[in-house]
Image (cartoon, coloured by chain):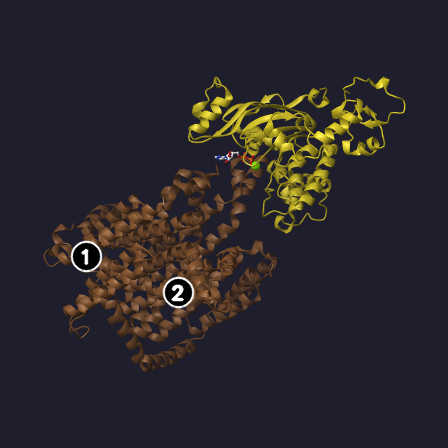
Amino acid sequence: MNDPIVTRPVKLSCRQVWKVYGPRPGYYFDTRGYQIEPETLARRLVAEGHIPAVVNANFDIHAGEIFVIMGLSGSGKSTLVRCLSRLVEPSHGQVVLDGADLLAASPAELIEIRRHKMGMVFQGFGLLPHLNVLDNIAFPLKIQGRPAEARESRAREVIRLVGLEGREAAFPHELSGGQQQRVGIARSLAVEPGIWFLDEPFSALDPLIRRQMQDEFLRLQDQLQKTIVFITHDIMEACRIADRIALMCDGRIIQIGTPAEILLAPADAYVADFTEDVAMGRVIRAGDLVGDPAGARPEALPADAPEVAADALLDGLIPAVAAGQRRFRVRGSDRRPGGVLSADRILDVLRHGQQ
Amino acid sequence: MSGPGGAIRARTVPPRGAAAAHLAGARWLWLVLACAALVLLRPALPWLSAFPPDWQLPVAAWLNGLTMPVFSWLRPFGRAAALLLDYPLGGIRAGLQSIAWPSLVLIVAALALRASGWRLAAFAVASLTYVVLCGYWRQAMNTLAIVAISVPLSVAVGFALGAMAHRWRRLVRPLEAVLDLMQTLPAFAYLIPLLILFGFGPSAGLVASLLFSAPPMVRNTMLGLRLVPADILESGVMAGCTPRQTFWLVEVPSAMPRLLLGINQTCMAALSMVIIVAIIGGFDDMGWEVLSAMRRAELGRSLLSGSVIVVIAILLDRITLGLATIGRRRAPRLGRRGLARAVAAALVLAVALRILGPAADLLPDASGRNILEGLDRALLAFVGATDAQFNLLRGAITYGVMLPLRIGIEGAATPAVWGVTLTPAGLALYAGAVGMIALLLWRHSRAGAAAALLAGLLLYTGLPGFPWIGFVLIVAMLAHAGAGPRLALVAAAVVAGILVSGLWLPFMQSVYLCAIAVAGCLAIGGGLGVWAAQSDRVSQVLRPVCDALQTMPQFVFLIPALMLFRVGEFTALIAIMLYAIVPPIRYVEQGLRGVPADKIEAARQMGTTPAQLLWQVRVPLAWPAILLGMNQTIMAALSMLVIAALVGTRDLGQQVYVALGKADPGLGLLAGLAIAAVAMVSDRILRGFADRRRGGATA
Ligand SMILES: Nc1ncnc2c1ncn2[C@@H]1O[C@H](COP(=O)(O)OP(=O)(O)O)[C@@H](O)[C@H]1O
Ligand SMILES: [Mg+2]
């Protein structure tokens, strides 16, 4: 598939990363790397009283991409994202950020990297209870020793960005959950990080607020174009915001792909189960389905065939299909290719979902 | 896998199959048989009831031999430290004395206003004026001076230790063991070594207070730092904090409410200790005042000075607690700036008063004494008028409950004590009654039946006359049932150690005193707790009473007991019970109220009567909480032993006190360690039962 995202430069790369909890995880990994097959090793670890929280994770995250890690609770998402920022020390593997090995960084270098290159948002918000909104947001800048005026003006900038004007003097316990997470988001953006980690940022919020926060998150990303690692256990949330999804189960990444790929071609029965209830029409877009089985080229289309954007949701095409349209001319975007789309294909997907 | 919680629970809950229960029941019956056999064998083998003296070892002397050289080596350092401590102490005392009392009242009232509100401020003004009117201002300031200097020291030391244990997790276990010991070891036991080290005077008291009041700070620091949410910690690290920044800018501020709570507890412990320590220090402060009044049997004076201590304690508690929770409430009545202004105004006032009348301290001189004399007369009249009733009560409980437990029915049923002799028929009747009770209990639980039989045996011989081997067996079996074989070994070793070091009789006296006190507290306090759980009004009335009882320094409980019942074991019992009655009230009420509403609804739905609901649903579900309350009661009773010894007992507490008089650190330490060991073992046993019950209830 011709996906423009994966042609962008790699920002963060994760190679054979393992995290094992237990009495002596170091015993299983020597400097030459493991020789046995990952699955065998994982099973042996469990049998010998260890918890392999992350098993052999491999992926590249590209600049400007929203990379979603999804899985049930306890599947190792938080552990994996913490391996990427070294909040958790991986037991084995390589994490390369901007071409440099993160695991080789000294403690002092790591502090510098965190101060300038990384931002993180937490499920429980992680706000400091004794600081008000302004000071919480300015906290990372204060840690860096920036002068007070610079701190404050930057903090006010991000406060405006997340729409919290007027609440600068409030303390965390005086804010609603949604507002607290806005503070968390603003704080993580204050240092203009190159890579942005969000660990289930909206899971503690009510469904309505969650939806609203997702919209605002997408709006922010349109503006900022960050490289994002976003954790969630909610498949709808993942499908709404992801460029690509990595699906985790028991510490293993079982499939990586765009939402459409995961929905249309699940790697196994587990993934299929997971995605069963997702409404296809609200996730899959015209560009995901181009390439007509009949092999018609755009030039061969009748002149009156309607033109749709590659990023248009299938749900939006239903009225036209119902009105009798058989073919659509799809205009490519920077995320999805253009081409020809047949109504049969749309109906097929909406009817059967997975193939 | 359900996470670490599940794993731990799985480990501590032993199999509870029917077969296991049956086996456990049988084990208890064997214990009863063994004890009965031992009791019957006593006439033939006298060493069974009295531990032979030539099996004893001079442990106290050894301890002295071991510690004395160390003490004498350390003494110069101690004396130097005492000298150093004397300067700030003297300074603070002089400072507090030189500030005219209206200024100080103003400062305290402003603090109270900021801490809580107008009501506390009014209480502060009223209570401090009361102190002035009673004529105890000078003594109160001297007490406050020691508190003022020992609290910052305790807080600093406690915070440092707690933070170290948080940083180096390996320190946690040894530190906790030391804390347990420091909090269960009666302060008197280490007063003697402190006197040797630091010499006679306030410095020794200061150090004792430091040792006693730092542990709560250590515990709260460890707990507070441990409970900082992972999210907050990680957000600090991700902001790029260095380890030092993480600690000071993230962890400490997040743990601040807990730390402030620790400071509050440290203050209260320091105050309590300062008053106890006055017994040896004997300089012009509140503790000395109470003690000398009690010694001279001046009822009015002891009551008045005791009330002054209580008032100060409550004030200190409410103000520190209020300041601790200030961040979590709405804006305080008095801002920081307002407080600063009030303090400045008070100081200006103080200086002005000094300049206007350099010699005047504005204290009323005669009024306090006049009140005292009137009060004394009134109290004497009251005591004289009610003497007969209280004597009756004392006689009834002494002869009906205390004596049988002390010398047993076999000892009490003599013409000299009860006026009757124990005939074989009477003995048979007694045995039959005990047997009946055991049979009735048998249907519910075998352990209960065994307990009834054992109690019957114990009551027959009296605690000190009970064969010591039997006692060791009982303790070991209890420990085994509560917390496993390791604790059984430790418990047996503790009892054996007490036997060998020749403290058996005082130890049994302690057990007997504590047993009666705890039983009484559980019956009365438990009843009150049940009542409070049923009725909101009772609960509202009891709560401030419990609060007040818990803030009072232990010492104060002696005063009313002494007033009504004079010197003696019964008076000690009353004092112990007054101090130890709060935990059963609190825990029983909390436990019963904490039973989930859905469980109660389900039971109601099944048609339970209120009594069935209480005994078959709420009490069993609240059992872990009730056990913990029992645990607290025992700890309180044990910690009160040494203080109660002041009014005349024959137990371990008295040994500590005797050792203090003879300046015999070995004996004092030994008796103190015995009390501490008993406290720790019984704590582990009861916690074990409570944990298992909780695990069993959910498994
Ligand atoms: N500090 C730890 N010690 C032991 N096991 C851990 C620790 N942290 C996480 N785990 C285990 O690793 C697994 C993955 O946890 P986590 O990454 O938090 O999952 P998720 O974020 O997907 O809910 C779980 O089984 C969890 O119990
Ligand atoms: Mg998680």
Q: Measuring 73% from the left and 28% from the top, which residue is drawn there?
A: A349
In the rendered image, which residue does mark 2 sit on? B525
Between B83 and B280, the residue placed more toward the observer is B280
Task: Give the secondary structure at mark 1.
Answer: helix
Residue sticking out furthest to the right: A303
Task: Give the secondary structure at mark 2.
Answer: helix
Chain label for disc 2:
B
Report the side of B136 relative to B204 (left or right). Answer: right
Per the rendering, the mark at residue B36 is 1
Chain label for disc 1:
B
Residue B16 location, x and y as percent?
A: 36, 46
Between B158 and A101, the residue placed more toward the observer is A101
Q: Nearer the viewer, mark 2 or mark 1?
A: 1
Count of marks, rendered view: 2
- In the rendered view, tell whether residue B19 sits above or below residue B92: above
Chain B rendering hue: brown
